[in-house]
Image (tube, rainbow, N blue to C red):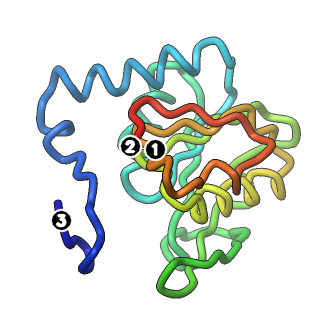
Amino acid sequence: MPDFPKPGIIFKDITPLLSDGALFREAIDLFLRACEELRPEKIVGIDARGFLFGSAVAYELGVGFVPVRKKGKLPYLTKETSYTLEYGEATVEMHVDGIGPGERIVLVDDLLATGGTSAAAAKLIAQAGGNLVEAQFLIELEFLSGRKLLEPVPVRSFLRY
């Protein structure tokens, strides 16, 4: 989608994939196959599309799901971290009791772009004592080099532009 959400941006819209049952299942299966070998104890999903993929993966694996949300959206005690966007700053948070020390975590989201939100989520996981074994994304915009912000965490993406 050209010029969305602002002029000059070419938005990668995943809603057609979500509305097609076979494609949505295949996308979930990509994450599942990648997660099975990692043996995560929890899946962390980033607000909001990471919830769609992450919760389905957690359900199929029989593990917990932990949401990372925009500030002010979680009802319990939280840890928060802020990060820089190309047009300002944002803050995300996670429940303080969502992850136990040493738990194996896989981070799941739809898109890796600049890496700011994912790096903030990784920071929250580390603050909780979690062991982030991999960050997984349906789509990666390689020209933005977002995976650099996640180093040394392994990054896996299924579609690259």
Query: Residue 78's image quarter?
Result: bottom right
Question: Is 6 or 67 nearer to us in this picture?
Answer: 6
Question: Is 153 or 78 nearer to us in this picture?
Answer: 153
Q: In the image, is residue 135 above or below residue 26?
A: below
Residue 102: image location, x then y, percent? 87, 36
Residue at screen point 81% across, 38% down? 131
> Which image quadrant: the C terminus?
top left
Q: Amino acid at mark 3?
A: Pro
**Callout 1 crowding tier (Cα within 10 Å): few <14, some 14–19, many ≥20:** many
Task: Tell me the mark number nearer the camera, choosing from 2 and 1.
Answer: 2
**Callout 2 crowding tier (Cα within 10 Å): few <14, some 14–19, many ≥20:** few
Residue 88: image location, x then y, percent? 53, 87
Residue at screen point 73% across, 59% down? 124
Q: Amino acid at mark 2?
A: Tyr
Q: Secondary structure at mark 3?
A: loop
Residue 21's label in the rendered image is none
Q: Which residue is mark 3?
A: 2
Residue at screen point 29% across, 20% down? 26
Q: Are the residues flagged by discs 2 and 3 in contact, CB closer than 8 Å?
A: no
Q: Secondary structure at mark 2?
A: loop
Q: Are the residues flagged by discs 2 and 1 in contact, CB closer than 8 Å?
A: yes
User: Which of disc 3 and disc 2 is earlier in sequence?
Assistant: 3
Residue at screen point 27% across, 60% down? 11
Q: In the image, is residue 132 above or below residue 77?
A: above
Residue 140's label in the rendered image is 1
Question: Is 45 or 111 nearer to us in this picture?
Answer: 111
Give left or right: position of 119 versus 15: right
Q: Amino acid at mark 1?
A: Glu
Residue 40: image location, x then y, percent? 67, 25
Q: Which residue is mark 2?
A: 161
